[in-house]
Amino acid sequence: MPSENEMRKIELATLYELRLTISESDKTDYTKEELLQLLDQIAIVKK
């Protein structure tokens, strides 16, 4: 099981990955559903 520090790093990396995904997109507005889909995609890749 990862330590608290390792979990924090994983959480921050995931947030940064989401940020990069959004910033690389041509879209400027996202719905709640679209953001949830992006998070789902990241979670699937991380498995």
Image (tube, helix red, strand yellow):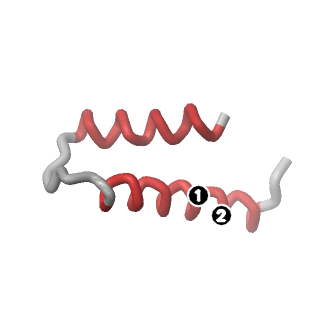
- Residue 4 sits in which quadrant? bottom right
Residue 19's label in the rendered image is none
**Depicted 28 relative to depicted 12: above or below:** above
Q: Which element is circle 2 on?
A: helix
Give the answer, above or below, for where 47 lies relative to 16: above
> What is the x, y in percent for residue 39?
43, 41
Label 2 Cα crowd, 10 Å radius (few <14 / some 14-19 / many 20+): few
Residue identified by numbered label 2? 8
Point out residue 45 in the picture as x, y percentages from the top left corner. 58, 36
Could you tell whether 26 is left or right of 36 in the image?
left
Residue found farthest to the left: 29
- Point out residue 10 in the picture as x, y percentages from the top left corner: 65, 57
Say which amino acid is labelled 1. Answer: Glu
Residue 11 numbered mark, or none:
1
Which image quadrant is residue 23 in? bottom left
Question: Could you say whether the residue bearing mark 1 is in a helix, strand or loop?
Answer: helix
Q: Is residue 19 left or right of residue 8?
A: left
Residue contact at pointers 1 and 2, CB within 8 angstroms: yes
Specify whether 8 is left or right of 22: right
Front residue of this view, candidates 22 and 14 = 22
Residue at 45 percent across and 34 percent down: it is 40
Residue placed at 58% from the left, 61% from the top? Answer: 13
Picture residue at 18% right of the left edge, 41% below the top: 31
Residue drawn at the location 70% of the way across and 58% of the way down: 7
Give the spatial CA distance, label 1 vs label 2: 5 Å
Q: Is residue 43 left or right of residue 1?
A: left
Percent of width and height locating residue 19: 39, 60
Q: Amino acid at mark 2?
A: Arg
